[in-house]
Amino acid sequence: MSINNREDLNKYYGLLNELIDVYVEKWKIRPTRLKKYLKKGTKRFENFLLRNNLSDINGISVVLSDIIDDRASMEKDGILKFESFNILESNNFGVSSLEDCFNGIERADIKMEKILADYFDTNLSDVTVVDSKKHTFSIDTWSEVKNVIIFSKEDIDLIKDNILDYLYHEFSNKKIELIDKISVDLSKIVDKEPFGDEISGNITDKLLKEILCELLNAKFKGESLDHFIFIGEK
């Protein structure tokens, strides 16, 4: 199936715009963040199309990319409606706590089950999904392992981006008092992009695993095929 004419193009633009509205509301994502949450070529991007029965349409990925670019440009240029900005600036929209760093993570899939089966040297039938949204599994080995948590490298990269968003959220909400009655609003003198570039290098792989262990109440177990495995505390 292909997009053959202007009528087809308009139809899919309208459909995808509606689907993006639902996605943005579900994950509380600012339009400028869509490029990272639904980056072309990533599993999340492909799953978005697959989930909505659009993956077999030739040219649909170009349409989706265009819509994501348009949304980001509209926010940057201040074209979005005033009401939309009120919503975007609310505490419920964005990464306002470390717990929000899991926003945008797709449900666990069969590939993760296979990786866990190989990692724990057991049969696929011995791997049970406990909560696909939280990526938790139970492994029925000779000594049963419960609360196994697994994330892909793509998941980890998104989590790190979300942590950077949270850190900027905390940073930009602060003011520095220079002298009596003179203070500086940090959000007005430091843009998000240079802030992220500066801080990103400080979040090493080791530190990121430590943060995740604390958030998940788990211990890092190991890596396998670009996937990171944790064992939750009992």
Image (cartoon, rainbow, N blue to C red):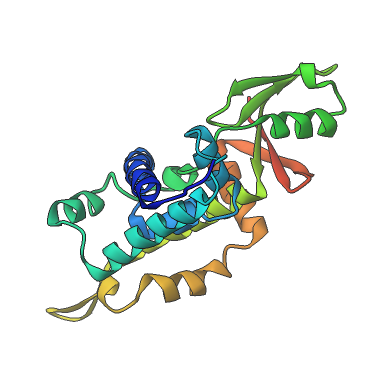
Instruction: Pick the quarter of the image with the C terminus.
Output: top right
Q: Position of residue 12 (x, y in %)?
A: 39, 44
Q: Residue at x 71, y 44 (%)?
A: 227
Q: Nearer the viewer, residue 185 or 83?
A: 83
Left or right? Give the position of 158 relative to 218.
left
Q: Nearer the viewer, residue 126 or 222?
A: 126
Q: Can you say whether 172 is above or below 139 in the image?
A: below
Instruction: Pick the quarter of the image with the N terminus.
Output: top right
Q: Quadrant of residue 14?
A: top left
Q: Position of residue 106 (x, y in %)?
A: 54, 38
Q: Position of residue 89 (x, y in %)?
A: 23, 54
Q: How many marks?
A: 0
State whether residue 222 appears in this view.
Answer: yes
State whether residue 163 appears in this view.
Answer: no
Left or right? Give the position of 194 relative to 225.
left
Q: Nearer the viewer, residue 185 or 62?
A: 62
Left or right? Give the position of 196 relative to 230.
left
Q: Position of residue 150 (x, y in %)?
A: 66, 37
Q: Residue furthest front?
A: 5
Q: Can you say whether 21 is above or below 200 in the image?
A: above
Q: Residue at x 60, y 43 (%)?
A: 213
Q: Quadrant of residue 74?
A: bottom left
Q: Nearer the viewer, residue 149 or 30?
A: 30
Q: Residue at x 20, y 56 (%)?
A: 85
